[in-house]
Image (tube, rainbow, N blue to C red):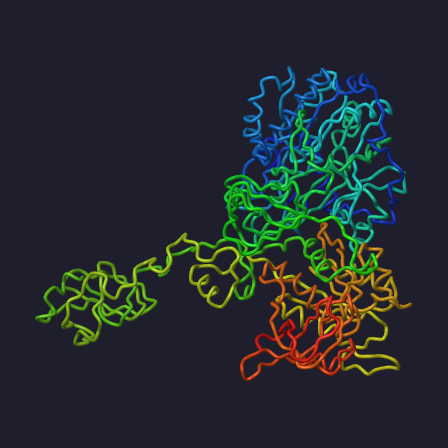
Amino acid sequence: MSDQGLRESVDLMRRRGLGPEAIKVFEYYYEQLEAGAQGTIPEDSIEPLGEIQALGEVQVTDEEARRALSQTAVIKLNGGLGTGMGMTGAKSALEVRDGLTFLDIIALQVLALRERWGVELPLVLMNSFRTSEESLKILAKYDSLAVDGLPLDFIQNAEPKLTPGDLVPVKWPQDPELEWCPPGHGDVYVSLVTSGVLDSLLEKGIRFAFLSNSDNLGATCDPDVAAWMVEHDVPFVAEVCRRTKSDRKGGHLAVRKSDGRIVLRDTAMVEDGEERFFRDIRRHSTFNANNVWINLEVLRERMTAREGVLGLPIIVNHKTVDPADPSSPEVIQMESAMGTAIEVFEGSEAILVPRTRFRPVKTTNDLLVLRSDFFSLDESYHVVASSDRPEPYVDLDSAYRFVSGFEQRFPQGVPSMRDCTSLRVIGDPVFGRDVTLVGEVLIDGYHRVRDHAVLGEPVQPEQPPARPTPSDVRTVDEHLRAILASLEPAPTAPIPLTESLGLVVARDVRAKVNLPGFDNSSMDGYAVVAESLEGAGTEPVRLRIVGEVAAGDDPGFRVDPGEAARIMTGAKLPEGADSVIAVEDTDGAAEGEVECRAAVRRGRFVRPRGEDVAAGAVVVSAGEIVGPRTIALLAACGHATVEVHRRPHVVVLSTGDELVAPGDPLGPAQIHDSNSSMLWAAAVAAGASAEIRTAVGDTDEELLEVLDEVVGVADVIITSGGVSMGAYDVVKSALRREGIDFVKVAMQPGKPQGFGHLTGPEGRLVPLFALPGNPVSSFVSFEVFVRPALRRLMRLKPEKRRLRAASITAGVRSPEGRRQFGRAVVSRSPEGELLASPVAGQGSHFLADLSRANGLFVVPEDITELVAGEHVDVILLDGEA
């Protein structure tokens, strides 16, 4: 099995012209893969990274910095194509700001460093063969950039993608180039050797190299790091940044217990069931910025000693052969990470750097902020922020996902974001000239944002509250806004039409075929040549019947002048025929000759090919909700699937030893678990898919064990119970260790709330809602917070249920400073007015009255009493009253 796969792979690599060193490294990883290696690092084999040097505390003289920089080269990893942003060429060729591409800015940064320090400082790109020509063309405009004796680039190696199971090279005749992949950015060390660039650098007296990704413009060659590395004789340095909750999916450094060496554990290197340790930002408090410094003399010594195989840990990635087509066959890609080389060199160190050195552009959300006036380029072409505020959070709809769609929607330039804290765009509006965004901005339902528009509300200085409010109490709107702002866009996926009902189309769909696909008859009658029936209105004309065509038949004959073919509704017109005479205007003969008693014009009773839809036309636009009629149109136009914003999968957990499954006998002090079934039904009704996991016990360990199981399959997790101040409410204590926030929300019922994200496989962030355990509190919390979140993930609008005006039929009291969501039976008066009749049991445990209610009446925070007949806003739970 594997011998054949290895032989075929090596043969392909030789025929592609790859050198023996690259083949030897491939064989090294192939043998590990064959033996079942996955490259994971168990938590019990490592310890958190200890105290490390901070860049801000490094003190070097100008002369030390200049001397170190004179022995340093800048190497940029530049093989990426930006396929995730819809690009087919070099990602670094994308214009990012002020008319400059990534590569322009990188070149200008290097030239500025040369001028400032009076050093040679070579720049070398590691390209793929797909990026080399385009990248070198951009750099060619900088005459002084190239350094004598050194190339501006070298080409990264390639390896075959493998089929799972038999581990043979995959075949993909649709695009044979997709049968190949880069071996990960850890290949940079091998490629430096095989290209001869390593030797050339050393011959020029270059002893050190700074390596980083070309899409990270914050990664400049800092002379202080170079000087610190020289002073302390460090062979390898990895830059790290402080982790926040949003960085949980990034790789981190740790110390291996067996030998005390620093190791990099990336997302794909986490063992199953240990995700909670990986995402624990208190235990592992820094993340790898993927900016590294290496002593090239030590690298050459180590490569020579190991005969070209540096021995970096294997990373096994499961992908599809066509990254743009999730339905294409699964493949295995063997990769290694550049940063994992830290474990190979004894004496390697990490250095803590500010986040300004980590500004990658991975999506068009990042691109928008980088192009905006929130950033600028200083005289050294460093990207600098306009203020100390955090970067604006941006969430653009799927129409902006690819660069082409992004550019079309900002034809006059991107808006001002200097004073923007967050931007959320639903739909695909086109932005006009000189738009300004201020504070928190939600754009929903616009077709165009007009020129000079100012959108959003300024962030006001905090004012003393009207009444004393505990610092940990949020308003309902604040809590919902925080939840919605934290949600990452739901992934899109092509799914069968039969599973797409109610979902939002992610991108424009074009007809694969004409509709109808051929000229066909709209009547039962006879297919004829119109000129054959000239004068038939005054004197009948007889035509020879040459055949018959039923719906679904492909006529194998033609109709010439003087001939006719019997034809049924929907049947394809025979060649030569250009019109149809209705059977009512003939004698209805089935054979021989037919007598025609009316003239017809050309095209009469003919449905022309493409009359309804022309092949290539947009038939369904991004943002449309798939309904029965949409499905009919897509099916008719040749589509078996449609790309939609995927239906999130919700896993519902109820916590507590007192819970028993419905139908099972109750023990002393036990109750049936009603919350799970209720929340499951609510999630499905909101459009999600859902499942119930059996009740979780009342210990931290039991809850965390179940969460580790479900985080790999869930898009959203909901717990109920264990969030208040009870002695046995362990949900709060367990989930706080996972970074979940617990707050009090000024509402009734549902005051205690928990929300945050767990980190799933491959760094995927999974929202977790910790709801109160009382049934009414749990239901109201779902309606107010979870349902809008699910609809946002699916891009369904409106996200919140609409408030309706009603008259309350009985007086109610409401606590001051809290928004009350009371249960009511909503009906209509004979005059058509909505009436809200509060149910008798308003306590958070009255499940029977909750079941009878079909609406919630909403009493604002500043109102403590309503009398019968007063206006009140209501939320209808079951459609129209």
Percent position of residue 761, x then y = 73, 53
Q: Nearer the viewer, residue 135 or 781?
A: 781
Q: Identify whether 325 is placed above or below 264.
A: below
Q: Identify whether 3 is placed above or below 386.
A: below
Q: For the point 71% across and 67% down, which residue is it?
A: 860
Which quarter of the figure is the C terminus placed in?
bottom right
Percent position of residue 630, x then y = 47, 64
Is 447 placed left or right of 594 in the picture?
right
Total marks in image: 0
Is 548 placed left or right of 252 in the picture?
left
Locate residue 240: give its quadrant.
Answer: top right
Is 215 placed left or right of 474 in the picture?
left
Locate residue 668: give its quadrant.
Answer: bottom right
Q: Nearer the viewer, residue 430 or 96?
A: 430
* Residue 35 seen anywhere in this rendered image of the structure: no
Residue lying farthest to the left in this orientation: 539
Q: Nearer the viewer, residue 256 or 693?
A: 693
* Residue 312 seen anywhere in this rendered image of the structure: yes
Is 743 placed left or right of 539 in the picture?
right
Percent position of residue 639, x then y = 47, 59
